[in-house]
Image: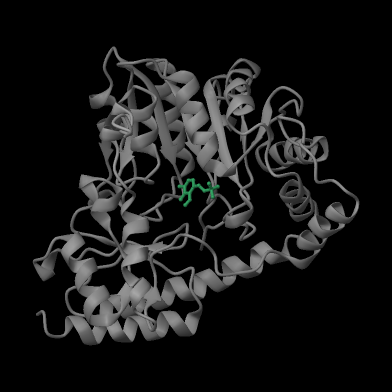
Amino acid sequence: MVTNLKPAERLKRIKTSGIRRFFSLAHGLPDAISLSLGEPDFTPPEYALNAGWQASKEGKTHYAPTNGIPELREALARKAHCDYGLRYDPNSEILVTVGGTEAIFLALMSLVNPGDEVLIPNPGFVVYEPGVVLSGGIPISVPLFEKNDFKLSVKDVTSLITDKSRVIILNYPNNPTGAVLSYNEVADLAKIAIERDLIVITDEVYEKIIYDDAKHYCFAAFPGMRERTFVVNSFSKTYAMTGLRVGYVYGPKELISSIWLMHQYMVACVNSLAQYVAFAALEGPQDFVRNMVKEFDRRRHLVYKRLNEIEGFNCALPKGAFYGFPNIKSFGMSSEGFAEFLVNKAHVTVVPGSAFGNYGEGYIRISYATAYKQLEEALNRIEKAVRHLK
Ligand SMILES: Cc1ncc(COP(=O)(O)O)c(C=O)c1O
C-alpha cells in the first residue's frame, strides 16, 4: 500500500483559482452563458493560422530553440522598438514563453528569495499571489480602490515598502478592473522603483486592448527602468490565441539569462508551430486587432449602460481590457454568494471579485469577451434575477 502519496507541503499554501471554479459550476447547465473566462471569442487571423499549417507541412515540428524561434524574437525586437522606442537584443534580452503565465512564474522564481516581499495589486490577476508564495516570497497586497478608479496609488505603494521589499508586480490595463495608467502615473511609479531599488515585473498583456483616448505606456520605456524591468506580454489576448500558449518577456541580459535557465528545464521550448502562428500574426496586417477592439468597445458600452440601468449595480466605464467590475455591495451579499446566485437563478457565470484578492470583495468581474447577442441575453437574465433581491 502506498502511504506516501501526499502532495508536497508547498501546495498547502495555494488554492484553486476562483475563475476555474465558477466556470465549472456551469457545466451541468446546458443553457448557461459564461461571462467568466478572460479570453477573446475571436478566431486568430487566418493568415496566422495558415502559417502554422504551412510550418507543419514543412516539418517544423521539432524542438525549437529554448529562447524561441529566431524570426519571432527578431520580430519582437522590432515591435519593442516600434511601440516603445526600446532596443532589446533578440539573442539575449527576449525569451518566448508558454504564455504570459510562464513568464510571470519564471520571473518570480528566478528573483525571489525566501522571505522577500513582493508587492502585488489587489484585486489582481490570480497568478500573482500563488506565484509569489511558490517562489518562497511574501505577497504584500497593494489595494486598488474604486474611488481611485482602481489605480495603483503611489502613496499606498510607498507606505507598504519595507527593507524586505524586492519586487513589485504592475498590471495595466488591469485584470480584473480594466484600469489603465496615465503617463504621469507610470512615471511616478518609476520614480519609486528607483528610490527604493525595486525590480519590476510589468504585466502588459492587455496593452492593445484600450479605449477612447487611453494610451499605453510601457513601463520599461521610462528613464532608468529598462535595466530593472521584466516586461511580460502575450499573444493570448491581442491575437485571440489563448490556447496556443505563446507569451514573451523583455528584460536586461542578466535577468533574461536567469529565467532562460529555469525555462530550459521546465518546458525546453514553446510549441514550435504556435511560434510560427505568433510570428505571422505579429508581422501581418493589424486590422484584426483593431476590429476586435472595436467590437469589444461596443460590448463595453452595452455592459456599462445595461448594468447601471439595473438598480443595485454601480459600474464604471473601464478604459482597458475586456472586463466590467461592477460594485454589487448594495445587494447585501458576498461577491461569492452573488456569483453563485447568478449561476443558479440566471444561469450566467461571472467571477466573484474576491477571487482576485480580498479587496475585490463587493464586486464581480464580467468578461465581455463574449458575442454581443449572448451578452445581451446574459444581461437580460441578470436583470430579471436580481429584481427580487431589492
Ligand atoms: C493580467 C494577465 N496577465 C497574464 C495573463 C496570462 O495570459 P497567458 O498565459 O494566456 O498569456 C492573463 C490571462 O488572463 C491576464 O489576465
Spot occupied by residue 362 in the image (x, y as percentages of width and height): 18, 58
Query: Going by the picture, which residue comes out furthest to the right?
Result: 58
Residue 232, quarter of the rendered image: top right
244 and 363: which is toward the camera: 244
On screen, residue 26 versus residue 86, left or right, reads: left
Which quadrant holds the N terminus?
top left
Asked if residue 315 can be seen in this view, the reply is yes
On screen, residue 284 versus residue 185, left or right, reads: right
300 and 250: which is toward the camera: 250
Which quadrant holds the C terminus?
bottom left
Residue drawn at (39%, 15%) of the image: 113
Residue 290, quarter of the rendered image: bottom right
Is 379 above or below relative to 216? below
On screen, residue 77 versus residue 218, left or right, reads: right
Query: Going by the picture, which residue comes out furthest to the top?
Result: 163
Spot occupied by residue 27 in the image (x, y as percentages of width and height): 37, 72
Residue drawn at (53%, 26%) of the image: 229
Residue 112, quarter of the rendered image: top left
Is 335 above or below relative to 189? below
Residue drawn at (77%, 36%) of the image: 64
Asked if residue 304 can be seen in this view, the reply is no
